[in-house]
């Protein structure tokens, strides 16, 4: 009889494209599921908790050991997919291992490239005018070879939004993009809602650069995106004349992200998508005696400050009634600024949950002598 390791090894000799480890043995498991993707030269394991996802790169030998260990200790099922087959490993309550192999239908069969393309929301071969002007698509909708990574990044962002807006039922969705810059993704978001989801959408982009705003409005007119407009203004103190459903803020520098999040919270925005950038504020404030290791090396302090900034932001959003996740936006190999904060307004959050999130944030704030802008703004407005 084959061992669990031998079954897993047999599965990975088939070069699977995707593997899902699921059905935790206990509700107390740290990870709720693990998704492993074949990156051709290595495997990437995405380990999902309730609020976060952690990534680990594995070699062929390591991924076999990794899956075996997970099934021996924390999970009861593994599903793996190659071009032609689905492989299933299931473990009973008594520890008995059952193995199945099922041929996929012709409709499901595909090459690796076709499989990846099928899963994209914005697919190659579709003429999307903004993507053509950005140089990502050719005039007939083909991805420019050198821009394939950018194409994947755009689709990753759209996938995160798509996963979040499935239950929005109103006729018109109002969106503000704070610090929109050249608005590459703003145009893509407008295209996604109007052309793919067939929803009415009203989007306003805000930025401080007059020439950028002028050019963006010209582009919106060129594409005939009638409900997309751009305004010159500061995020801090911005007044909105309509109810905002979604706030987007991508690479708003340093505390500009805090002002964007504060506005979103104050308005009771249903969803927030934020990719923070240039988290300098806390880096200049950090002082600690007990954890001086984190401040002994400049590069460590800088990265620790950036991660701490976003962790505090996440907890403050939880305090204000949002279900918050910190997700990987793009592969770390492409940019170190790869964390996306996704927050969805809850229908109700218990006082205990809010208190726990606030205590965690305030403990870090005290320990490292910090004064985060978002924390200060919420305190001043009596929202904490």
Image: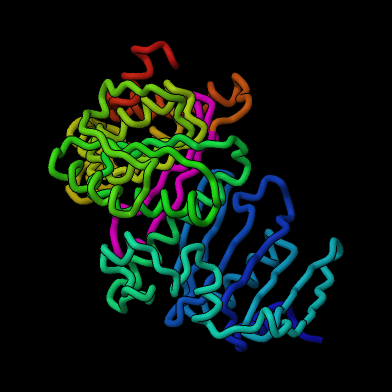
- For the point 55% across and 35% down, which residue is it? 323
From the image, which quarter does the C terminus lie in? Answer: top left
**Start-end of magenta stretch:** 317-344
Q: Is residue 15 visible?
A: yes
Q: How many labels sit on residues? A: 0
Q: Quadrant of residue 238?
A: top left
On the image, the x and y values in percent for residue 261 come to 37, 31
Q: Nearer the viewer, residue 42 or 84?
A: 84
On the image, the x and y values in percent for residue 3 come to 74, 81
Q: Is residue 369 visible?
A: no
From the image, which quarter does the N terminus lie in? Answer: bottom right
For this orientation, the residue located farthest to the right is 94
- For the point 46% across and 25% down, which residue is it? 243
Left or right, residue 379 beside residue 254: right
Q: Nearer the viewer, residue 255 or 4?
A: 255
- For the point 70% across and 69% down, which residue is it? 78
Left or right, residue 378 beside residue 9: left
């Amino acid at each position: 009889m084959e061992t669990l390791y031998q079954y897993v090894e047999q599965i990975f000799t088939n070069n699977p494209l995707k593997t899902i480890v699921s059905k935790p043995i206990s509700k107390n498991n740290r990870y709720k599921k693990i998704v492993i993707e074949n990156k051709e030269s290595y495997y990437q394991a995405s380990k999902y908790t309730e609020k976060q996802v952690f990534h680990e790169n594995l070699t062929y030998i390591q991924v076999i050991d990794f899956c075996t260990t997970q099934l021996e200790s924390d999970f009861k099922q593994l599903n793996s997919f190659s071009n032609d087959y689905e492989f299933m490993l299931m473990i009973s309550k008594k520890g008995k291992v059952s193995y199945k192999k099922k041929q996929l239908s012709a409709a499901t069969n595909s090459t690796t490239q076709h499989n990846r393309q099928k899963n994209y929301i914005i697919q190659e071969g579709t003429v999307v005018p903004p993507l053509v002007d950005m140089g990502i698509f050719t005039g007939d909708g083909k991805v420019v070879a050198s821009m394939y990574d950018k194409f994947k990044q755009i689709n990753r962002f759209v996938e995160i939004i798509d996963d979040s807006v499935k239950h929005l039922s109103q006729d018109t969705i109002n969106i503000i993009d704070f610090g929109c810059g050249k608005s590459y993704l703003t145009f893509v978001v407008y295209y996604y809602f109007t052309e793919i989801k067939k929803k009415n959408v009203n989007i306003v982009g805000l930025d401080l650069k007059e020439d950028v705003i002028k050019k963006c409005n010209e582009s919106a007119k060129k594409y005939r995106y009638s409900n997309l407009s751009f305004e010159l203004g500061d995020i801090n103190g911005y007044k909105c004349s309509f109810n905002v459903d979604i706030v987007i803020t991508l690479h708003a520098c340093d505390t500009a992200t805090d002002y964007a999040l504060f506005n979103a919270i104050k308005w009771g925005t249903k969803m927030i998508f934020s990719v923070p950038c240039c988290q300098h504020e806390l880096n200049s404030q950090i002082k600690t005696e007990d954890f001086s290791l984190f401040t002994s090396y400049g590069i460590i302090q800088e990265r620790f400050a950036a991660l701490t900034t976003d962790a505090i932001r996440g907890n403050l959003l939880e305090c204000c009634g949002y279900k918050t996740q910190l997700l990987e936006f793009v592969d770390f190999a492409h940019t170190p600024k790869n964390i996306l904060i996704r927050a969805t307004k809850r229908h109700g959050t218990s006082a205990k949950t809010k208190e726990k999130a606030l205590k965690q944030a305030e403990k870090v704030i005290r320990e490292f002598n910090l004064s985060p802008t978002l924390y200060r703004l919420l305190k001043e407005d009596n929202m904490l």
